[in-house]
Amino acid sequence: MASGHTATREQRTREVPVWDLPTRLFHWSLVVLVAVAVLSAKMDVLWVHMLAGQAILALVLFRLAWGVVGSQTARFADFVKGPRAVLAYLGRRRAGDAAAEGAALGHNPLGALMVVALLLALGSQAVSGLFTSDDVLVDGPLVPLASSAVVATLSTLHRLLSDGILILVGLHVLAVFAHLLVKKDNLIRPMLTGRKTVDTPVPAPRRASPALALAILAASAGLVAFVVRVAG
């Protein structure tokens, strides 16, 4: 009986595409750049820190645009839900509803909150960094365009957000490993391969063109470079 049940379950499970290549490249590029930004700041290699911050800003701008016109699972409309949906999801989880976790092909409602929080925090950190000054040697590229009061405020925000981002990243990593070790749900593999194993038949999500993603990334990087160059 047990072997028959296992065979039936294996027949039901299948792999489906979930994350497109632009979303996966964005994710891992952001991981590398955040690590570079943190390490370069701690080592006082501030020119690297500023370049990493500008690259992070370009990536965040890309992700915001890709969240509107990109592939289905990357779109905010697909995974960002209101408070009622988040509470309902948490209620189903507490009740032991195993289907609650697999209901969303992409981000679940709780994971969506982390995505939004990280994008807002990283975007705010990158923008504030453009206006940050240490009052000694290093000024952000947009410092000459702002008043001393604005520079002081954004410099303080930049320092405070650095700790907040590390907390958010830590919570994100803990959640990923909790899923892996407790729920036996590997969230890392789909972000590497783009495919996810599901128990119930689901249609493959709609994909946007990689050429569109490349155009958006080029426009985002160009915008950041233009603003920095004009200010300088």
Image (cartoon, rainbow, N blue to C red):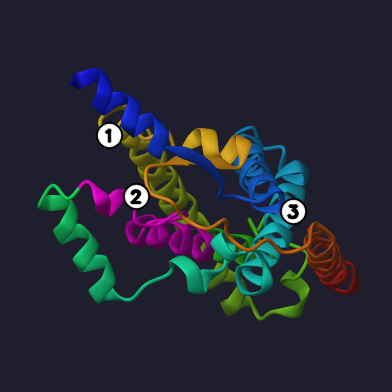
Q: Nearer the viewer, residue 38 or 44?
A: 38
> Which quarter of the rendered picture does the C terminus lie within?
bottom right
Q: Are marks 2 and 1 in contact (CB under 8 Å)?
A: no
Mark 2 or mark 1, which has the lower sequence index? 2
> Which is more toward the observer, 197 or 153?
197
Q: CA distance from mark 2 to mark 3?
A: 34 Å
1 lies left or right of 207: left
- The residue sitting at 34% across, 25% down in the picture is 7
Q: Nearer the viewer, residue 195 or 162?
A: 195
Q: Which residue is mark 3?
A: 55
Q: Looking at the picture, how far across and down is residue 213, in whole percent?
A: 77, 61
Judged from this view, the residue extending furthest toward the top is: 3
Residue 147 lies in the magenta-colored region: no
Give coordinates of residue 142: x percent, y percent. Answer: 75, 70
First in sequence: mark 3 or mark 1?
Answer: 3
Which residue lies at the image location 41% right of the left edge and 53% below the top edge?
Answer: 164
Span of residues in magenta: 98-121
Instruction: Name the kind of residue labelled 2 in the image.
Output: Gly
Disc 3 crowd, CA 10 A, few/some/many (<14, 14-19, 20+): many
* Residue 155 in sight: no
- Amino acid type at circle 1 is Lys
Most common SS among magenta residues: helix
Q: Nearer the viewer, mark 3 or mark 1?
A: 1
108 is within the stretch colored magenta? yes
Secondary element type, mark 3: helix
Q: Classify residue 183 by image quadrant.
A: top left
Q: Does 206 sit left or right of 159 as displayed?
A: right
**Label whose residue precedes the other's in the sequence (2 or 3):** 3
Query: Residue under circle 1?
Result: 183
Q: Residue 126: name its quadrant.
A: bottom right
The label on residue 102 is 2
